[in-house]
Image (cartoon, helix red, strand yellow):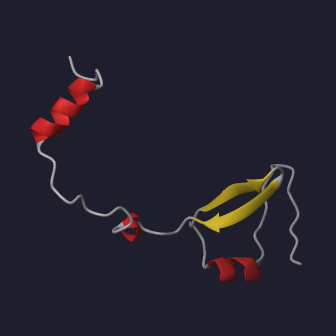
Amino acid sequence: MTTATITSKGQVTIPKDVRRRLGIGTGDRVEFVEIQDGVFQIVAATQDVQALKGIVPKPEKPVTIEEMNQAIAEIGGAD
């Protein structure tokens, strides 16, 4: 198990082996995700927004501006 020490300012140096395995380096960001009460997972937040392309499928039929405005009006979002 790899360990690190917290400084008086709350900073932690991520050990070299962990950085290498996460594929992160200077200037990269990490996220701390709570997976259960008091247990966190460190996740590299280095993916480009382009990596999200294709996650949401294209609609079968394109929606027109008029249809969008009508849907907004129906939920009371338009004046």
- Counting from the top left corner in percent of width and height, residue 35 is at 74, 57
Instruction: Tell whether 39 sits left or right of 41.
Output: right
Quarter holding the N terminus is bottom right
Where residue 44 appears, as percent x and y from the top left, is 60, 68
Residue shown at the point (61%, 75%) measured from the top left: 24
Percent x, y for residue 31? 64, 59
Left or right: 69 with respect to 19? left
Q: Quadrant of residue 4?
A: bottom right
Callout count: 0
Q: Residue at x 14, y 38 (%)?
A: 67
Q: Position of residue 8 (x, y in %)?
A: 87, 50
Query: In this image, 4 relative to 67: left or right?
Result: right
Which of the pair 67/42 is nearer the observer?
67
Q: State the residue lying farthest toward the top.
A: 79
Quadrant holding the C terminus: top left
Which residue is drawn at the image coordinates 86% and 76% (left, top)? 2
Q: Which image quarter: residue 57?
A: bottom left
Tell me which residue sits at (12%, 40%) in the image: 65
Between residues 31 and 11, which one lies in front from this camera angle? 31
